[in-house]
Structure formats: C-alpha cells, structure tokens
Amino acid sequence: MSDSDAAEAASGSKPREAGGAPGPSFTQSYSPQAASSPPLQVAFDRRELRELFELYGRKVAAGEWRDYALDFLRDRAVFSVYRRTAEFPLYRIEKNPRLARRQGAYSVIAPNGLILKRGHDLGLVLKVLEKPVRLVVG
C-alpha cells in the first residue's frame, strides 16, 4: 500500500474516476404518498401571524400583555400570551385544522380551559380579546 493509498483509506475518500459526475451522487425518487401526506406540524401562515402580532402589539402598548409563545404541534398551532413571563398563559389562540369544517379552525381559550370564541375567521375570533369602546360623557 502506498502513502497515498494509506491517506485515502484513513480519510475514507476514494479518488474520483475520470468521466464521473463531480461530487456525491444523490438519487431522488418521487413518491405520490409523500406529496399527499399531512404536514408534520401545523403552523400559522403569514396573514394569520400578522393578525396575531397586530393584536399582540396593541395589548403590549396598553400594558396588558408582556410575553408570547408559539407552539407548532402535529395537530394544532398555538399562540399563547402571558401577562408575566413565569406564569401559565393568559390566553391561548389555537389553530386546529381538524375542526375547520365543523366549528372553525380558530379558537381563543381562557386559562381555565373555557373556549371564549371559536370560528372560521381569525379576525372575528380575535375580537373577543378587544375591549369594547366606551363612550365618555363629560
């Protein structure tokens, strides 16, 4: 065994043959089952995140909320809001696609597990967290 053969054996690489494709060769196969399989996790899309963060920004500016968490699970996506960072969530906004054709994919859940609002449109569901406008008469 020559010095170059010993170096190649130690590094685990083989010399490239003439006429071969440069670099490693990867074969990709298309499987129709993989394309139609459900996603590994549920997530909020860009429009939904914009609505959530607009509400979150207003509530932070008002001093009501201080922190949030995003959880992307296999069956649902959860946006949790906190009054303080070291406690359980004040509200959970969940997206559950399994319920999209029934009660609606979106729901707002209170800390005790009570569902405050459920529906098909995230904007309408989030209105339950908005304070009603009061008329001040002086």
Image (cartoon, rainbow, N blue to C red):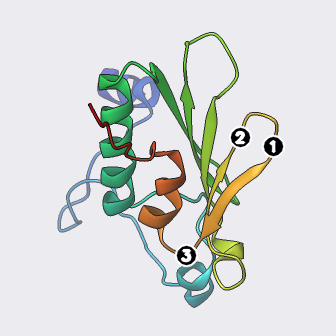
Q: Which residue is mark 3?
A: 120
Left or right relative to 29: residue 100: right
Density class for disc 1 (Cα within 10 Å; few <14, some 14-19, many ≥20) is few
Question: Disc number at residue 18?
Answer: none
**Label 1 element class:** loop
Q: Which residue is mark 1?
A: 113
Residue 122 in the image: above or below residue 111? below
Picture quadrant of residue 86: top right
Amino acid carrying label 3: it is His
Amino acid carrying label 2: it is Ala
The reply to whether the C-beta atoms of the residues labelled 2 and 1 are less than 8 Å apart is yes
Give 109 or 136, whichever is nearer the viewer.
136
Between the residue at mark 2 and the residue at mark 3, the CA separation in whole angstroms equals 19 Å
Picture quadrant of residue 37: bottom right
Between the residue at mark 1 and the residue at mark 3, the CA separation in whole angstroms equals 20 Å
Q: Is residue 14 visible?
A: no
Amino acid carrying label 1: it is Gly
